[in-house]
Image: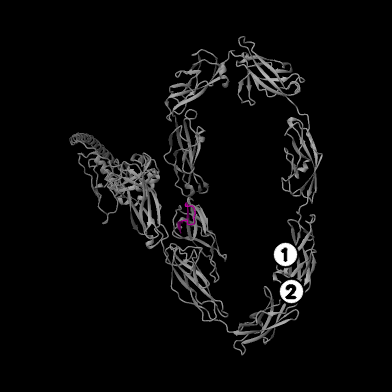
Amino acid sequence: MSLRPAEDGGVSSLLLLEVSLVILTSFAGAQSQNRIPSISTIFAEVVEDTPINEFAFQIEASDPDSDPLTYKIEGTKSTYFNVDPNTGRVTIRIPLERDDTPGVIQIIITDANDNRPIFENAPYNENVKENTTLDTVLFQVSANDVDSGPAAVVKYSIDEASPNDGLTHFSINEYNGEVKLIKTLSFTSLSTFYRLKIKATDGGGPVYNEGIVYQSNTAFAFITVVDIPDLDPQFLSTPYATTVNEHSPVGQSVFKVQAIDQDTGINDVITYSIEGTNDLFEITASNGIITVKSDIDREALSDINFVVVLEVTATEKNPSVLGTQAQTTTEVRITIGDINDNKPKFYSCGVNPTDPCVEASSFTANIFEHSSMGVPVDGLNIKAKDLDQGDNGRFELSLAGPDKDAFSVSPQIAYSESPVQIMVKNSQAVDYETKKSMVVQIIAEDLSNTVDCCSTATVTIQITDINDNSPTFPKETYDLEVDEHSANGTAVDTITATDPDTMDKDSIRYRLLPDSILKYFDVDAKTGRIFVTNSKLIDREVISLHSATLQARDQANNTGTTVLQITLTDINDQTPQFNRESYIDFVKEGSNLRIQVQATDRDEPPNSEIEYGIVTSDYSANFTIDPTTGWLENNGPLDREAMQDEDNGQVKLNVTATDKGSPPLSTWVPVVINVEDINDNKPKFRKTSYKFSVEEGKKAEFVGSVQAVDLDKTIDHNRISFSIVSGSFGQFIIRTFNDQPDGYIGNITVDPDIELDYESSVNTFSLKVEAMDLGSMTDTITVEVIVLDVNDERPQFKPIGPLLVKENTTITEAVGKIKAVDLDKNHSLVYQLVSSRCRCNGSLDLGPCSEDWFNLEPTGEIMLNKDFVIDYEMCDQVELKAQVVDEFTQKGENNSATPGIIVINIEDINDNAPAFDKTESFYVVVSESASVGSVIASVTATDRDSGKNRQMTFSITTVQFWDAVNNKTTNVDRVLRVVTTQEDDKYVGNIQNNEVLNIDVKGKYLVTVGATNTEEPKLFSETKLEIFTVDRSLKVELLFSRTVEEVKAAQSQIVLLLTAATQTKVEVVKVRAGKDSLETRETVNTVMEVYFVNANGTALDSASAETILSNSDERFKLQIEYGLKNIGGTVVTEKKVDPVLFVLLGLVAGLIIVLAVMTTSLVCTRRSYRTKLKAAKAMNSAAKVVTGGDQKSGPVVPGTNKYTMEGLNSLDYNMDMVMSDKDTMPMMMIQEEDEEWGADNAYSEPLGEALAQRGRKKDNDSPSFSFASPSLSTTDL
């Protein structure tokens, strides 16, 4: 049993477990017919975190004999599972792992989604200026999920924001974690701080007994909005409006404006100014006070409605963030107050409201005579204006002059401005015949103005005559003619009317009535010209006469009429029409035909007179027609057999009818004449004689066919039957069949009851065959039949050598040919492809071909299959197995006894470009000692071609350096070079530095490396590398309590744990032996020098690495399994110390140590004597304690767990318990020796082990021990 990754395009998190199962047959008796059981379970899927003893899958098996089955799992990985031998139920035995070896049952181990995404560098803090443009990427979050497949795909979202409108200001890319600004920020009007809760969710995956589970994690981002001086100043208490009287004194204060700076804390100084041209007012720049600058005349400001609008600008003293002066503008509306200083005046205004008004005293107007009372005169555009306002602008209007009694004025009282109208007061006085013009005077008076009060305007009124006559025509009725179907616009006639009114001169308009006539004719409204409107509708054959009324109308809508009679004259516009759509007649061949055709024409003579004719065709020369009467007759006898077969006995003529109009019109009609066949021809054989051959020994064998034809055209007259008249001798028969496309065929066969014998005396027959139609007309022919021997030899293949074909070839001719021989002279060999086998993927054996590269033609030629392309990298040899068949073989096997085999070797060509192995970003440690030519990175590539075609060289295409500090990229092509080497089947490109790299540079090299074949065509591919530079000051030393060999052996596992803990790329620089530890006295120390490099090229220093590893779960495994003891930094450079100072410090330290030792010795000696005295007293007391008579006992010594001292002197052990009364050994040394003793002995005291050996049987094999206790002497005992 083994595990391997799935190769069927599945998700990478799935593993394919193939389990080999052996099912033992039941215990039924061994029978000769007992059949093998079968397993139906092929695939099973198991989640990798399925617990031990839980159900994994069920082995389904069956036995055709229904015998009991025993189940068993075998294989190298069978220890993962337990199987019930009776039921086939499989459970988990040990936790599942993933592997890569084959088997029989495939079990897919799916990755359990048991890890949640982990954010990097969380939380996220970002300061954002309030004027940051939309769609700017503010920062990027990143989370990793150590699961695989969809469970490793992380998507990001913003779950919540504080305040809530933060959700509308920021968005996150769900795929790469980029946080963008999507709505404008504002320090003054919106929040100055936002907190985003960002959620990372994986793609989901299965968990045991829980189905699909989605893991997620959250992190917080804090965004602070930074205020900038970007706001314009703001005016207070807007809008601004005030009033000042005209002619106010210069310098009078009018109004004051005030503005403030909106930028908090800046409060810049503001100055004021008035924009544009202004001669009336001015403003003080420092305080915003507006004063009168010059004399103000309100009436001069009528074009601005007596309101002066000042555009006042407030400008900050210092530039804004954009480098410009921040400013704002507002309007100040100053209304000019009025005083009564103007009299009313008259003005002439245009017709349109936008036309200007001009002061005038003379005006003209007009009005129709006898207009009704109250009707205003026309053309009088007069206004009366008093430029003052309100009551100051009040004035009165009145009339004077010779004709004042005939008219009145309106209005009589007005304010400031009013249009003036003069209206008819006496209708009878307004008479054109009495006065053609009248004059009145209008007086405007300002009663409150005693100095200059009045104005006068004279109006001359022209009297206009009115229209009181109707138009008249010279005649009451007009008779007109026009050709039918005349073109549109053709003039019929021009008729006009007269009107004595002068205003109607050249103003009469014409119209045709009723409206229904307009679809035929119409009239020019100005000239009275009558013309055709629709040439198609004026058809004499439909309507020959049209009646209409011509109306004339003057400007007063007075009308006059006359009657029009329009007659249509005939033209040749009607085509002759035949009485029938077609004419059909029947006539026997050899007889005469007579048939009449007739046509009519709706035109009048001569346009309706008709002549008949025949259109030229295949048979038109055989017929004539009378041009006047239309009688159609044949010229001579009709022969059915002379006609074309496709006509099927039908003669089709087209007869025409043409009128005598100008131009003449014609039409035609089909005339079909069916010529009936008669039996006037006898059968006729197609050949004068026939000769056939037939093989011997075959009953009812086909011999040959004879053909005959009868030229008659119908089946009643041309049907033929065949018979053998003589020469058959009962050996042959003949049957009659239709012969396409015409005639009949007679198939001659061997009689079904007869077998021809080639060895007989007669092997050639001369048959007399007769053909007869239904009218008993006959024809005869001689047929010779030769009896042949049969073919009974099998074909055989000729040996052929191997062929050589280049891959990717597209030749259209044969690449080779397989040949076979047949001993029979009469043979036809056809070749067939039986099978093909290929040697693929470097295998030494032939196997099935996944693609059929070659086709075998029936001729034996081997051709390329255009559906596929030959690929040497897929297979390098093809073996074809063929079969040959003799199509002429009549007895025995017709194929070869053994198949033909041909070997085709595939020749490699250079058709694959080098392929780079998948690489990650490279990290290079840059130090000041790095020498030129050092290998800083390597790339590997392979080529699927073989031999010289796979050889390649590397080159560096481009090198750019990205400066991480200045965020700048520069070209540095000469910094690096690449050296090509070969390792096994791969080519290695070692990237070396051409110059010493700068230790102070922080960033990364963007390197493009290309690989090119050495053989033509030189195929090329490239890859891109990111080589980061890391300062060696960030190197971290890890101390392990293992040997160098052990650390190197576990280096990959250690790197994986360090990577998981720090989420960085771990680069190991060196593994070396370390110095001995003074504290632990361990002699095995190994130092691993590493760099912890982040994805952005930065690295962790020693302190950061220590903090992260100390808080990670991986550190415990590193300590327990690999002996991680300490995390240190880079090598510390020692400072130079003055030797004299060092000596003085050493002497002082020595004196302090001596004093400490002496003090400690005195204290310990005193304690030792006290201890010994207490032990002696305890021994004396313990000696008095006695147990039973037979029991050996002794004193109970404190600290010995009641060890028995009886018979101590008789022990076989040499116990040295003598110790000097002067205990001068320091306490520290005593403790160290106790520790050494305890390390090698299970007993805590030497006395304890000595007593424990008491009573053991002494023999020669027992070793002799001695115990020395430095803390115990005879005095103590």
Q: Which colour scheme is used?
A: one colour
Crowding around mark 2 (Cα neighbors within 10 Å: few <14, some 14 to 19, many 20+) is some
**Which residue type does callout 1 highlight?**
Val
Q: Give the range drawn in magenta.
A: 1-15
The residue at 49%/22% (across/down) is 277
Query: Could you tell me which secondary element the residue under label 2 belongs to?
Result: loop
* Residue of label 2: 639
User: Closer to the camera, 591 or 1110?
Assistant: 591
Asked if residue 1205 shows in the view, the reply is: no
Asked if residue 78 shows in the view, the reply is: yes
**Which residue type does callout 2 highlight?**
Asp
Query: What's the mark number on residue 672?
Result: none
Q: State whether residue 1158 is above or below residue 884.
A: above
Residue 234: where, in percent of width, then height? 49, 24
User: Closer to the camera, 537 or 98?
Assistant: 537
Q: Marks 1 and 2: which is nearer the front?
A: 1
For this view, does 290 lie left or right of residue 395? left
Query: What's the mark number on residue 615?
Result: 1
Q: Is residue 112 magenta?
A: no
User: Closer to the camera, 1013 or 673?
Assistant: 673
